[in-house]
Image: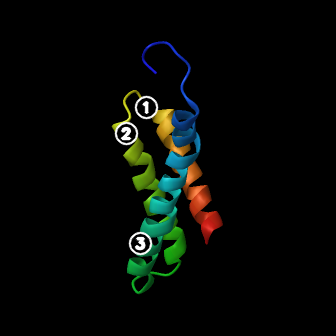
Amino acid sequence: SSTGELPRWPEVWVGVAFGPLVEELIFRGYLYRAAEWALAARIAHSGRVAAIVVAAVFALSHLAKGGITTPQLVSIFITGVLFGVLRQ
């Protein structure tokens, strides 16, 4: 909290567990499935391409958080690709 106190447990839970879970459901759940479906009729290896596209969108979505650096963005993108490939 902004008063110098330690955060309460619900705040920690949301930041550490619930937030990333929602991100995964949105990006590697809904968006991945939608991208793979949209690409399946057009290109081979649509799952791999969908993983890369969704990872890029995932990384770019983190730009909303101020102060993010290029190495952090690259790391988020690579992690997103790995998670997308593992999802296949």
Mark 2–mark 3 contact, CB under 8 Å?
no
Label 3 environment density (alpha carbons within 10 Å; few <14, some 14–19, many ≥20): some
Which mark is on residue 36?
none
Q: Secondary structure at mark 1?
A: loop
Residue in view at x 57 percent, y 63 percent: 84
Quarter of the image where one finds residue 35 = bottom left
Q: Residue furthest left?
A: 64
Q: CA distance from mark 1 to mark 3?
A: 26 Å
Which residue matches tag 3? 35
* Amino acid type, label 2: Leu
Q: Secondary structure at mark 2?
A: helix
In this rendering, the answer to whether 36 lies above or below 6 is below
Q: CA distance from mark 2 to mark 3?
A: 21 Å
* Amino acid type, label 1: Ile
Mark 1–mark 2 contact, CB under 8 Å?
yes
Residue 42 located left or right of residue 15: left
How far across and down, in percent of the image, does residue 21 sit?
Answer: 54, 53
How far across and down, in percent of the image, does residue 82 sit?
Answer: 61, 57
Which quadrant is the C terminus positioned in? bottom right
How far across and down, in percent of the image, does residue 15 sit?
Answer: 52, 38
In this rendering, the answer to whether 54 lies above or below 38 is above
In this rendering, the answer to whether 86 lies above or below 80 is below
Which mark is on residue 63?
2
Which residue matches tag 1? 68
- First along the sequence among labels 2 and 3: 3
Q: Secondary structure at mark 3?
A: helix
Label 2 environment density (alpha carbons within 10 Å; few <14, some 14–19, many ≥20): few
